[in-house]
Image (cartoon, grey):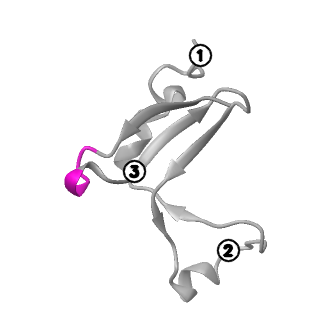
Amino acid sequence: MALVFLGKDPESMQGQSPTVYYDDERDTYIVQSWKVTEPERLAQLDLPDHETVIELPRRMMQFFPEVNVGEGPNT
């Protein structure tokens, strides 16, 4: 598996997070971002025990290739 760095939030303090990666073996995205922990928000989701959710600012969508080109990251 080779993770391909796609972008880091230009507004994050000291360039920490959020960050978007592409997994070229699984053809999936890996997103590093803020963990959602507020019970009232989590209660609105049908979230299995083996999953988690993160919060990603809308401005990060620019790093997903499909948003800009309409195609995947390998094109």
**Left or right, residue 15 beside residue 49:** left
Asked if 61 appears above or below 45 in the picture, the reply is: above
Closer mark to the observer between disc 3 and disc 1: 1
The magenta stretch spans residue 54:
no
> From mark 2 to mark 1, how far is it between C-alphas?
32 Å
Going from N to C along the chain, the mark reached first, 3 or 1, is 3
Which label is found at residue 58? 3
Could you tell me which residue is drawn at 44 percent across and 25 percent down?
68
Name which of mark 3 and mark 2 comes first in the sequence. 2
Say which residue appears at 60% left-offset and 65% top-offset: 53
Q: Secondary structure at mark 2?
A: loop
What span is colored magenta in the figure? Answer: 10-14
Mark 3, Cα crowd under 10 Å, few <14 / some 14-19 / many 20+, is few
Q: What kind of element bears circle 1? A: loop
Q: Based on the displayed image, in which of its 4 quarters is residue 41 positioned?
A: bottom right
Mark 1 belongs to which amino acid? Asn
- Near mark 1 (Cα within 10 A), the count class, few <14, some 14-19 or many ≥20, is few
Which residue bears the numbered disc 2?
45
Q: Is residue 37 above or below residue 22?
A: below
33 vs 2: above or below:
below
- In the picture, the quarter occupied by the N terminus is top right
Label annotation for residue 13: none
Give the CA separation, mark 3 to mark 1: 23 Å
Residue lying at the far bottom of the rendered structure: 39
Q: Quadrant of the C terminus?
A: top right
Residue 26, position as x, y percentages in the image: 73, 33
Residue 60 higher or lower than 2, as above or below: below
Circle 1 sits on which residue?
Answer: 74
How crowded pointer 2 is (Cα within 10 Å; few <14, some 14-19, many 20+) is rated as: few
Q: How many marks?
A: 3
Q: Check disc 2 and give the amino acid type.
A: Leu
